[in-house]
Amino acid sequence: MPHRRLAALMTASALATSCAPSSPESAGPALVPVPASLRVTEGSFTLASDARIGVRSAEGAPVAEELARLLRRSTGYALPVVREPAEITLEVSGDQELGREGYTLDVTPGGVRLAAGTAEGVFRGVQTLRQLLPAAIESPAPQPGPWTIGGVSIQDRPRFSYRGVMLDVARHFFTVEQVKRYIDLAASYKVNVLHLHLTDDQGWRIEIRSWPELAGDDSYTQDDYREIVRYAAERFVTVVPEIDTPGHTNAALAAYAELNCDGVAREPYEGTEVGFSSLCVDKEVTYRFLDDVVREVAALTPGPYLNLGGDEAHSTDPEDYEKFVARAQQIVDTHGKRLMGWAEITSGSVAQHWNPREPDRARAAVARGAKLVMSPADHAYLDMKYTDSTEYGLDWAGLVEVSDSYEWDPATVVEGVGEQDILGVEAPLWTETLATSGALEFMAYPRLPGIAEIGWSPAAARSWEGYRARLAAHGPRWSARSVTFYRSPEIPWN
């Protein structure tokens, strides 16, 4: 998996002064995320039934085949992939000027040319190309067309290298196919990380062969997890597994009595309260358990990070917590991964800011040299209700309408934390109240695309008025994909 993109922060400040039209009246295409640089040009291109997709490199061929698959289902055209320039040409140039994910896209009456230094960059550009086509291109069955794209010249690259979604599969379990659909929808907005919250008080959702009683019927086998990782990698999405410790561990404490300080197994738990469980820090079996879990999960995960949570460990003595995290850091290091955790964690290379009431934790993480992933719950938590009457979700961080999820900036949300301290953004979706794909999608859409734009687009390119106008055009796209979404009254839906 090409995961080096997560190692360094990327910015697009050099492109920020040449950005897409952002007023509701502008004639530019309704692209989300908005590109770093977009110029509308004369003429248009219409995809015809005899069109081909050209790609000259083996590296770019899988992206070309995926594009052909997507376009064939809605157009009914054959769209052969050929190893020469064609009506739609994808080019992997090897040029790193725009980084691993940057690309250029030009649409003229003569055709479409999409070029990038890597196949990953070409894939990001394909998501833009899909949005340039009519909304019916997202249909799973042939539609009448025409398939016309207005002339544009785009140069684009991400602001941040980490643009994630987190899916909680512990409170409610979601199948491999449901996770794949969530990946597909997120990747179409240039999301490049899937953080899987695999364990919690309510459930342990991944097979650990050395501790076979952890996972019940509703869980992923190791082959299931491999399939999620493989599918994500094909879409240039890196999976970050989370094994939450030392709190949020009741499911493990119920499965194995020896992990409790008193040697008595805990009762299974299905509630929503947090902070009551803890691994026994003074028992050596705790670290043998943790080493086995990390070893097996790390071996299944090609990406650089392993998340050990560390949040809301209210039942762990502070001194014991420090002791546990120090040992956990050593274990993660031993198995070749970089430790990641929520803002409470006191070690690791990445900390995730989530609680708007505790900005000091974010500042402390930066002070010890960690990078931050920004997920302030009052803006980025997709499980927060839109309004008092929203059927799903919680409201402990407030009500989060579409404008609330969009109108914030990672580099200003915590005083003293700037652009240089931030790895990226993530939109977590906790599932205490969510048990179906329809519920997931209703809470994620239309908010997730805005958070993806915050992670991708230059700050100077964004405005609420421009975004709400562009977002409105995505309603028909979601309808074509049978996405269940919230029709916020803030958006002038088409």
Image (cartoon, rainbow, N blue to C red):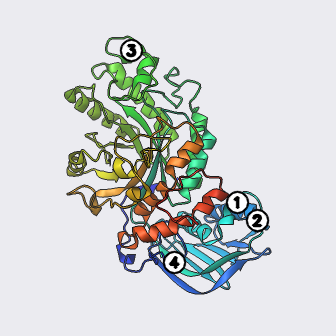
What amino acid is at disc 4? Answer: Ile
Determine contact: label 1, label 2, CB under 8 Å. yes
Q: Earlier in the sequence, mark 4 or mark 1?
A: 1
Mark 4–mark 1 Cα distance, whole angstroms, equals 25 Å
Mark 3–mark 1 Cα distance, whole angstroms, equals 53 Å
Secondary structure of residue under mark 2: loop
Q: Residue at (33%, 46%) from the top-left corner?
A: 354
Secondary structure of residue under mark 3: helix
| 2 vs 4, front mark | 2
What amino acid is at disc 2? Answer: Gln
In the displayed structure image, the side of residue 485 where residue 418 appears, left or right? left
Total count of labels: 4
| 3 vs 4, front mark | 4
Q: Which residue is mark 2?
A: 143
Eyeballing the image, is 155 above or below 403?
A: below
Q: Which residue is mark 1?
A: 139
Determine contact: label 4, label 1, CB under 8 Å. no
What amino acid is at disc 3? Answer: Glu
Mark 2–mark 4 Cα distance, whole angstroms, equals 27 Å
Q: Residue at (36%, 37%) from the top-left corner?
A: 309
| 2 vs 3, front mark | 2
Secondary structure of residue under mark 1: loop
Numbered tag placed on residue 258 in the rendering? 3
Q: Looking at this view, is 293 or 397 the one in front?
A: 397
Across and down, in percent, residue 20 comes to 46, 77
Q: Which of the image's four quarters has the C terminus?
A: bottom right
